[in-house]
Image (spheres, grey):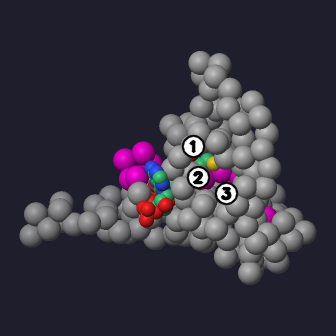
Amino acid sequence: MLENVFSRKPEFEIVTMSADDCREMSELHGQRFARGWNDGEFVNLLLQQNTYGFVARQTNALLFKPSLAGFVLAREVAGEAEILTIAVQERLPRAGLGWRLMLAAMREAQARGGLSMFLEVDDGNGPALGLYRKLGFEIAGRRDSYYQDAEGRRSAALVMKRDLG
Ligand SMILES: CC(C)(COP(=O)(O)OP(=O)(O)OC[C@H]1O[C@@H](n2cnc3c(N)ncnc32)[C@H](O)[C@@H]1OP(=O)(O)O)[C@@H](O)C(=O)NCCC(=O)NCCS
């Protein structure tokens, strides 16, 4: 019986983000990006009318409120949507969570009247580029030397776009 509990495959649900998620989002963001955002920044963004997001949480965990598995934050203004940030726990690579979070963000953008979606990605970020390409995003622009890592190395930002519809 207990063996089943410990060996079962994790299952996840994608739910609408709320202000209560912001502390965990800030922690996860700090783990996955060189420049962290504090929870106040997330709360302020989420309070804006055009901003929305989704979080991934495990549904069959032993804990009452399992830790955040991933999140996406997006914005839709006058037909143009934008991914502000997306991150999935490093211990859950390639489990389909990035894909599911992006689909949720794209559907919500459409429901809000979005006709196209934009995002910005480091041209050295293979996993993110793989995810966006698989979702049908195409390169729409390039900003050379846009990012700088902790060692001072610079890299380009790619602007990617996908029509919604
Ligand atoms: C980018 C990120 C969100 C992807 O999340 P994920 O849950 O691992 O992605 P998924 O499992 O949904 O993968 C969907 C598809 O993306 C692509 N992909 C994901 N990881 C990849 C990798 N390491 N290499 C190449 N392609 C990859 C694949 O096409 C994959 O489909 P497949 O597994 O059927 O081949 C995650 O790696 C992350 O949080 N990275 C750190 C934060 C970050 O870089 N955010 C994006 C900033 S622009």
| Vertical placement of residue 61 versus 108, above or below | above
| Residue 94 appears in the picture as rendered | yes
In reply to whether residue 86 is colored magenta, the answer given is yes
Q: Which residues are magenta?
A: 81-93
Between the residue at mark 3 and the residue at mark 1, the CA separation in whole angstroms equals 18 Å
Q: Which image quarter: residue 125?
A: top right
Horizontal placement of 97 versus 51: left or right? left
Q: Quadrant of the C terminus?
A: bottom right
Q: Nearer the viewer, residue 144 or 94?
A: 144
Identify the residue under disc 3.
Answer: 73
Assess mark 2: CB under 8 A from ligand 1?
yes
Q: Name the main secondary structure of what is drawn in magenta.
A: strand
Identify the residue under disc 2.
Answer: 129
Q: Nearer the viewer, residue 109 or 162?
A: 162
- At x 78%, y 44%, the residue is 142
Element type at mark 3: strand
Horizontal placement of 31 versus 140: left or right? left
The reply to whether callout 2 and callout 1 are in contact (CB within 8 Å) is yes
| Residue 22 appears in the picture as rendered | no
Specify which label sits upstream in the sequence, 3 or 1: 3
Between the residue at mark 3 and the residue at mark 2, the CA separation in whole angstroms equals 17 Å
- At x 67%, y 76%, the residue is 107
**Disc 3 versus disc 1: nearer the observer:** 1
Identify the residue under disc 1.
Answer: 125
Assess mark 1: CB under 8 A from ligand 1?
yes
Horizontal placement of 51 versus 21: left or right? right
Q: Which image quarter: residue 77?
A: bottom right
Percent from the top left, x then y, of residue 113? 82, 77
The kind of residue tagged 2 is: Leu
